[in-house]
Image (tube, helix red, strand yellow):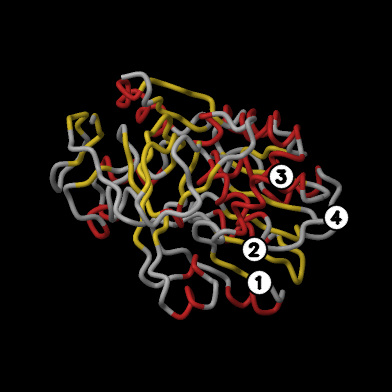
């Protein structure tokens, strides 16, 4: 099969022939149709310090995908050949304290598809049946199915706290931040503001129905509050950027008792005014991945029940290329000026 392969501890990928993976007794083999390019994949491609610290090569990367089941192991009970599916990328142990308590997203032995085991930048991928999400809704296109993983990040983050009637600040208008706009609106938020410095991404946010798209190279969040007619601070903060200045500015503009969900991974230490966190009684919650599998049920339910949200989430995919043009796709994703980039593995 064709696959994007990292043969050793160095930058770059190669599109080469690799042996097809085989399904074990509890596994499902999937013919990959589409894959999304994630920030994690950009780190792996460039072989930066983070990638070097967490990845062992050789490796096939890729963890955001949609495809068709072509074979199943003898112990697989529910997934059938021909099912159209996406995959939860965190493979858990099932026996640690959190797994046994039903908190599988907190498994201390998590192995990530496309990071610590071969992933979906290939014509075929194998994952455990427990990680397969079958799409029963025919309105889920291959492009939309490919972004269920990051959509799940947006849903997990946005629904960490009740949103009905709340004023929401989102920092970072990348694909996940953009999807969080639609989720927050669906969940009943009052005013939604989003920050970024990319004019194209802020324009995408406006099309998603955000109340105010803030270019923080020209406008401060406190001024955005005035423009929105807010007398106090934001009630809910969704930090999606990982930028070192985003969280401190968010903290400075939260209402007392405000709650912040943090998904963005900072690349350096952030200086936090912990006195303000204490005296303003703020809550900060770290978010990683998706709740397994409540987030997946929420995603499917929202898409099938809300045509506007379905349209907005689908619109986050702004570029689709043949997997043969993967280098161009990675260049577009790395530029950080558009939405989600999807590679089509049926066109090689």
Horizontal and vertical percent position of residue 41:
34, 42
Q: Mark number for residue 112?
A: none
Alpha carbon distance from label 4 to label 2 = 16 Å
From what the image shows, is residue 161 above or below residue 186? Answer: below
Earlier-in-chain disc, 4 versus 3: 4
Comparing marks 2 and 3, which lies closer to the viewer? 3
Earlier-in-chain disc, 4 versus 1: 4
Alpha carbon distance from label 3 to label 1 = 27 Å
Horizontal and vertical percent position of residue 205:
66, 34
Q: Which of 133 and 152 is in front in this view?
A: 133
Horizontal and vertical percent position of residue 255:
76, 65
Earlier-in-chain disc, 3 versus 1: 1
Q: Mark number for residue 302?
A: 3
Residue 125 falls in image quadrant: top left
Q: Mark number for residue 283?
A: 1
- The secondary element bearing badge 4 is classed as loop
From what the image shows, is residue 174 above or below residue 319? Answer: below
Comparing marks 3 and 1, which lies closer to the viewer? 3
- Residue hosting label 4: 165
- Residue hosting label 2: 260
Q: In which quadrant is the C terminus drawn?
A: top left
């Amino acid at each position: 099969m064709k696959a994007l392969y990292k043969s050793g501890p160095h930058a770059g990928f190669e599109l080469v022939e690799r042996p097809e993976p085989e399904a074990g007794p509890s596994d499902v083999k999937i013919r990959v149709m589409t894959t999304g390019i994630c920030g994690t994949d950009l780190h792996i491609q460039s072989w930066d310090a983070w990638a070097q610290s967490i990845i062992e090569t050789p490796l096939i990367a890729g963890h955001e995908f949609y495809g068709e089941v072509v074979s199943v192991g003898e112990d697989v009970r529910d997934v059938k050949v021909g099912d159209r599916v996406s995959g939860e990328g965190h493979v858990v142990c099932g026996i640690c304290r959190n797994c046994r308590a039903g908190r599988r997203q907190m498994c201390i032995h998590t192995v990530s598809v496309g990071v610590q085991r071969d992933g979906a930048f290939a014509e075929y991928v194998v994952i455990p049946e427990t990680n397969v999400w079958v799409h029963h809704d025919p309105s889920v296109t291959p492009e939309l199915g490919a972004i269920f993983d990051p959509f799940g990040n947006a849903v997990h983050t946005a629904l960490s706290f009740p949103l009905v009637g709340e004023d929401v600040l989102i920092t970072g208008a990348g694909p996940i931040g953009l999807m969080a706009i639609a989720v927050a609106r669906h969940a009943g938020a009052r005013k939604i503001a989003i920050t970024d410095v990319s004019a194209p991404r802020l324009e995408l946010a406006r099309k998603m129905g955000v109340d105010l798209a803030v270019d923080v190279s020209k406008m401060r969040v406190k001024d955005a509050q005035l423009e929105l007619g807010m007398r106090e601070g934001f009630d809910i903060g969704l930090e999606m950027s990982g930028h070192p200045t985003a969280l401190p500015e968010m903290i400075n503009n939260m209402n007392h008792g405000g709650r912040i969900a943090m998904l963005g991974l900072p690349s350096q230490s952030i200086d936090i005014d912990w006195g303000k966190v204490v005296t303003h009684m703020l809550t900060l919650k770290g978010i990683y991945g998706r709740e397994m599998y409540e987030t997946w049920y929420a995603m499917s339910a929202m898409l099938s029940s809300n045509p506007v949200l379905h349209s907005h989430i689908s619109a986050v995919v702004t570029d689709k290329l043949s997997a043969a043009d993967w280098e161009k796709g990675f260049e577009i994703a790395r530029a950080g000026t558009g939405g989600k980039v999807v590679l089509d593995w049926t066109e090689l």
